[in-house]
Image (cartoon, helix red, strand yellow):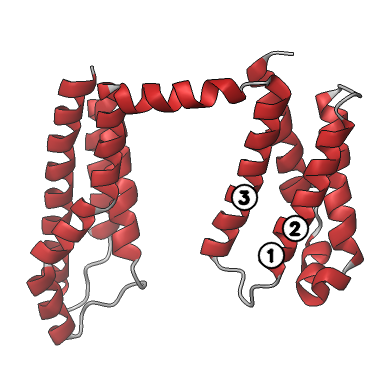
């Protein structure tokens, strides 16, 4: 079997198990009963059986057993947390993906290629530049923009006009910068203009409140600063990587 095909088969089995063939009633029952829930065991067995069927290699029964046991352990870890937050969900899916990756590496006998790949990654200027570029726009640039616009944010708080979802602006900024950097690296410069236009329509659609001009100016300053820094980073990455 093709190497990529096996990885896709393992991923398909997981997606079907976790998101398609798991009724909401099972999730609620598992959350309530945890290890005493019969559905937790059924769900884990389904994960293994689906993996076995989709792989279509009947000698790989031990992979199905491995998937079943690890799926049970990971789901039980998730259920033992009081709140099913986004962080817990992402960690849960990350653990499942690591299990899938381990299974894939074992089936394809690619364990001897991991170290050369790591060595290649850290010796490739292009990959390092792209990775650093995304890390910069996700983390430091956000802090920089936040610090630079803090006095205006405080002014809005003083005026009592900074009413928005908690941390929404930070996450919007992160996704915006990821998109802008991706557009630059893929030569889709015109898409940046559409992104700015789309945000402008949303931000300027309802400005009937008194003092809304200050909020608009605050958002505009933050957006332009964020975009400008990301564009500079994008061109620097392109200079190194391409």
Is residue 194 something one can see in this rendering? no
Q: Are there few (<14), some (14-19), or many (20+) residues within 10 Å of tag 3?
A: some
Q: Residue at x 61, y 75 (%)?
A: 83
Quadrant location of the N terminus? top right
Q: Which residue is mark 2?
A: 73
As helix, strand or loop, the secondary structure at mark 3 comes to helix
Mark-to-mark CA distance, 2 and 1: 6 Å
CB-based contact (under 8 Å), mark 2 and mark 1? yes
Q: Quadrant of residue 41?
A: bottom right
Q: Are there few (<14), some (14-19), or many (20+) residues within 10 Å of tag 2?
A: some
Is residue 233 something one can see in this rendering? yes
Q: Quadrant of residue 145?
A: bottom left
Q: Are there few (<14), some (14-19), or many (20+) residues within 10 Å of tag 1?
A: some
Indicate which disc, 3 or 1, sits on the residue closer to the N terminus.
1
Q: Residue at x 55, y 55 (%)?
A: 90
CB-based contact (under 8 Å), mark 3 and mark 1? yes
As helix, strand or loop, the secondary structure at mark 1 comes to helix
| Direction from residue 17 to residue 237 in the image, left or right | left
Q: Which residue is mark 1?
A: 77
Q: Nearer the viewer, residue 8 or 103?
A: 103
Q: Quadrant of residue 109?
A: top right
Residue 211: x %, y % from top left: 13, 77
Q: Residue at x 69, y 13 (%)?
A: 2
56 shown above or below 192: above
Q: Nearer the viewer, residue 204 or 59?
A: 59
As helix, strand or loop, the secondary structure at mark 2 comes to helix
Residue 85: x %, y % from top left: 56, 68
Which label is found at residue 95? Answer: 3
Q: Nearer the viewer, residue 210 or 110?
A: 110
Q: Nearer the viewer, residue 12 or 94?
A: 94
Q: Residue at x 91, y 24 (%)?
A: 58
């Amino acid at each position: 079997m093709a190497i990529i095909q096996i990885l896709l088969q393992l991923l398909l089995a997981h997606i079907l198990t976790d998101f398609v063939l798991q009724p909401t009633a099972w999730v609620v029952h598992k959350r309530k009963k945890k290890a005493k829930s019969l559905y937790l065991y059924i769900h884990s067995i389904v994960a293994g059986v689906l993996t076995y069927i989709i792989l279509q290699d009947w000698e790989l029964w031990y992979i199905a057993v491995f998937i079943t046991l690890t799926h049970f352990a990971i789901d039980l870890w998730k259920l033992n947390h009081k709140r099913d937050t986004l962080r817990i969900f992402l960690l849960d899916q990350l653990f499942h993906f690591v299990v899938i990756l381990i299974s894939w590496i074992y089936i394809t006998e690619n364990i001897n290629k991991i170290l050369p790949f790591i060595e290649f990654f850290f010796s490739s200027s292009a990959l390092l530049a792209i990775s650093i570029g995304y890390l910069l726009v996700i983390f430091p640039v956000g802090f920089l923009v936040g610090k630079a616009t803090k006095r205006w944010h405080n002014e809005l708080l003083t005026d009592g006009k900074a009413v928005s979802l908690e941390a929404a602006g930070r996450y919007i900024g992160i996704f915006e910068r990821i998109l802008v950097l991706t557009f630059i690296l893929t030569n889709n410069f015109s898409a940046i203009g559409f992104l700015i236009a789309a945000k402008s329509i949303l931000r300027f659609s309802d400005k009937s409140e008194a003092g809304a001009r200050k909020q608009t100016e605050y958002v505009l300053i933050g957006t332009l600063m964020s975009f400008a820094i990301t564009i500079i980073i994008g061109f620097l990455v392109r200079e190194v990587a391409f």
